[in-house]
Amino acid sequence: MLNVLVLVFALMQPDVRSLILEQRYEEALELLAQVPAAQQDLEHHLMVSQASLALQKYDQAIEALHLARGKAPQNTSIQLQLARTYRASGQPEMAKAVSETILQREPSHRQALILLGAIQFDEQNWPASRRIYEELARHDSLNTSFRYALSRVYSELDLRAEALAQLTAAKMLSPNHLGVLHDLTRLYYELDQLDLAMETANAAVTLYPTSIPIRKRIGEIEFKRKNYAAAAQQYKEVIGLGEETASAWRNLGMCLYFAEDFGAARDALTQSLAKDSKDPNSNFYLAMAMVQSDAGELAIPLLDSTAVHSMGTLLVDAYIQKAVRLDQQKQTAEAVKLYALAYQLAPTRHEILYFTASAYDRTGSNRTDARDFYTRFLNSPGTKDETMANYARRRVSILTEEIHFRN
């Protein structure tokens, strides 16, 4: 009976191999499952692992590879496939352990180094990843993948000059590599080399016109150049390509606002807030677009939301803009409180003193406060807006005279 089973399995093997070659993995596994445990040799386990891995049945593939390793404990190829399968299954520590076992025996094993470098990169262990990719690039300087991976590690370590050198070399090796073109654009942008950034981005978008990341980069460059309409066009393309996220609508709205297309900015920013009602930039610039569209009465709730969900410069701006709106409504006391909050947060923004003085001045009954704040503004350090400064000087002179005669 045993001899019959051996013969049956021997006859099955060519069929299983054919099924795997034809990518009929489920059928291959069904045939392999019929083989008795006593007849499951090394080739059987390898075929089970191959078919299971193709179907992303990682646990089954790992079990088969362990059985295969038991039959060939020194086989590096089996260990490497086991490490790769562990990584694919979301078990990086096991993948790392198996990779390191290979490297202990063969320190320069290329595939094990590549795998371990990728695992360290996934885990954001930048120093370890750097050591591995530097070794790989040293041994194969014409490999674009190694240089590209090393550039990304250098970027994470804030070694921009080194990253730029690797990306430049990678671009020479593979001028159509989308990742290289994208990262090179980003790095030129960060280094404020906008002409080179645009040149690289244009080359990339010519090759890959539907690349959303590249179009975003072009939008950033145009925005930084203050070409707001051109930047808006890129974000329209991004949305047209299917990325209708809150950030895409927000960026479009901000570009349109600075391009002074306030109606279109309102529409885009409203779309952004429909997806993320807490976004501080969307709330703030929609408020500003409302003001520019003569709908300032709708700005205050948006500015309140901005203040709740922001900090830093945007929070200060929200306080200032709300104070301006309240001042226009003759709610001077509330406006002054907000100006005080803003100045407390940003004591170097001396224009807030000017706004406070103006609010007091407009009441007609707070001459002393108005004069004192104008004076504080004029005496504050740093360069001032000349129009504001000239007006403040005139008002100090006039108010001082009025206060003198009133007393």
Image (cartoon, rainbow, N blue to C red):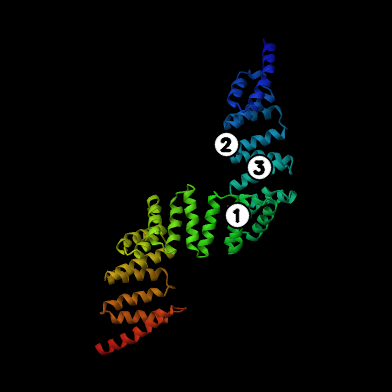
Q: Secondary structure at mark 2?
A: loop
In this view, the mark in front (2 or 1): 1
- Amino acid tagged 2: Ser
Viewer can see residue 407: no
Whichever of callouts 2 and 1 sits on the residue coming sooner in the sequence is 2
The crowding category of the residue bearing disc 3, from other C-alpha atoms within 10 Å (few below 14, some 14 to 19, many at least 20), is many
Dots 3 and 2: beta carbons under 8 Å?
Answer: no
The amino acid beneath tag 1 is Asp
Q: Are marks 1 and 3 in contact (CB under 8 Å)?
A: no
What residue sits right under mark 3 in the picture?
Answer: 115
Which residue is drawn at the image coordinates 32% and 72% (left, top)?
336
Q: Nearer the viewer, residue 161 or 169?
A: 169
Residue type, numbered disc 3: Leu
C-alpha gap between disc 1 and disc 3: 22 Å
Per the image, the residue denoted by label 2 is 89
Asked whether 379 or 273 is in front, the reply is 273
Residue reaching furthest top?
1
Q: Are marks 2 and 1 in contact (CB under 8 Å)?
A: no
For disc 1, the marked residue is 183
